[in-house]
Image (tube, rainbow, N blue to C red):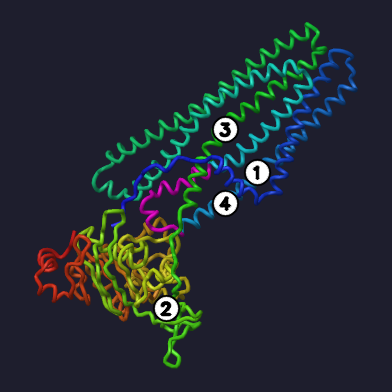
Amino acid sequence: MPPSRNTKPVRKPKDAGKTIKRILTYLLDYKIHLVFVVIGIIFSSVASIAGTYLLKPVINNLTSSADIPKLVRTLILMGTFYALGIIGTFMYNRLMLTISSGTLEKIRVQLFTHMQSLPIKYFDTHTHGELMSRFTSDTDTMREMLSQSIPQLFTSVISVIGVFTAMLVLSPILTLLVIAMLFLILAVIKKIGAKSSVYFKEQQREIGKVNGYIEEMIEGQKVVKVFCRESKVKDDFDVINESLCNAATSANTCANILMPIMGNLSYMHYAITAAAGAFLVIKGVIGDIGTIASFLQFTRSFSQPITQMSQQFNSVLSALAGAERIFEVLDEKSEDDNGNVTLVKAEKKDGRIVESDKYTGMWAWKIPEKTGGFSYIRLKGDVRFHNVTFGYEENKTVLNDVSLYAKPGQKIAFVGSTGAGKTTITNLINRFYDVPDGKITYDGININKIKKADLRRSLAFVLQDTHLFTGTVKENIRYGNLYASDEDVVNAAKLANAHSFIMHLPKGYDTHLSSDGANLSQGQRQLLSIARAAVANPPVLVLDEATSSIDTRTESLIEKGMDSLMHGRTVFVIAHRLSTVRNSDAIMVLENGSVIERGNHEELIAQKGKYYSLYTGAFELS
């Protein structure tokens, strides 16, 4: 069986600089938007600085000549600057929302699309919650960074530069005092920021664990209740939730104490500057009160953007950690597919198989020739294993030197205890996993040379774990063949003996299903799964415990319907109930990854070997 999913934490972010550069490649799609964002930020910052600078003439006017018309003109100019600043702020914030939403839409599309190309092994070794967190918490932190943190950081940088320039113009001496306080502030930011980075990465990992556990428990809620394990589940959840709580507390402690510390340093800075300014006015170094008033306001304006930068720094770190987790998935290697043999509709002309542009009921493998042409081999369903050895993990084999064959039209059954390798054989036939040792041929062609999509198109699977999608009954059946007509859907349902119960549903084939078909019984869901395989009209059919959730009466009805579906097709059946495999052309008995017996029911009973022991001892395998 495939390896179980684990909850190991993902790797820590390795290269923040590389991640930033990668994010910038997405932002380049919005060059014009970004130009106006920069203009808006500069406009907003400059307008704010200019408005603050005008405090000097306003206060000097009030303390000297009290020229009312001039004062009114200055106040109107000040108000105009602040109004323009508001317009600039609105403009860049609105544009950044457009940029962030569009960027995240593109990333989500790429992430979802790339996940469709990843091998089954990737999903076997990662929890659902861990993968879902890429689409939820990780993308959400990126949204905050792009729409809020980045613009605020850029605004803060522009403001600091502008305010610093204005302070130099007003008083170089007091500006030196500001620089001294700036070094103290930066030292505090560096110290707290370093700790915050570590804790935020840990928080992201713990969120993935919690999400994975919650999803697993929701899916297995019936099992939990059947075995009365609510207390055990709660205790286990408390442990991982406590880990998340500790990580989140540590991360947010650093983030939350930074703002008060910066605020207090800012107040201390303001008081020292005010005292120093008063002293310089008394000594006559600074000639007017307006300069001090304007400078003090700039002092507040100077410390505020620095405080904002420190506040947003943690958000950026968290977003970069999330972005790198997303990019790690995007960098995962897609499923290899080096095949060049394709499956095409075919027909016979002058005794030769040729490609056809219409459905004829005949399929053929289209094989490229070295000369540049193509040769065609009719699809018959001849599947053979040649000395196949395979394991999901290194140094741990599941199949050991397995050789077997299924001739066209044969029904081959696999029996054996759990872990014997039955499902693994079907996983190799459809190339969910590739064979490292030995080979598998399909109509004489090594399956590694067949394109995976074409290979899988020639197969139809009915799995033990059924999955129905949100939509109507008709849409779920048609999922097996998107080009099937309504008549094809009904015929497939009749073939699987699902038509009767479907017609008793509130809206028949148009009945809406949700939550994986929760409003249907397990047996009914399995019937729809079989109908979905039937409508695909496959040359090869694989039934992996297809009737495990169906009662004996329904099973007998299905078998009658399936007989016509299986006619002329190669069929692989995995079953625990030995009563369901007696009419197979060949029965493979597996044990510890090896085929120990092969033959039909009568032959194996006559051998009085493992199959005889299983059959006479019990009709079902555990």
Gap between marks 2 and 4, in whole Å? 39 Å
Q: On the rendered structure, is 135 left or right of 562? A: right
Q: Position of residue 510 (x, y in %)?
A: 44, 67
Give the residues in magenta: 117-140
Q: Earlier in the sequence, mark 1 or mark 3?
A: 1
Q: Which-is-in-front pick, marks 2 and 1? A: 2
290 with respect to 418 (left or right): right
Residue type at mark 1 is: Met
CB under 8 Å between callouts 1 and 3? no
Q: Mark 3 highlights which residue? A: 313
The amino acid on which the numbered mark 3 sits, given as a three-letter code, is Phe
| Alpha carbons under labels 3 and 2: distance apart | 58 Å
| Residue carrying label 1 | 96
Q: Is residue 606 above or below residue 128?
A: below
Whether residue 6 is situated above or below residue 158 in the rendered picture: below
Q: Which residue is mark 2?
A: 365
Res. 577 in view: no
Figure quadrant of the N terminus: bottom left
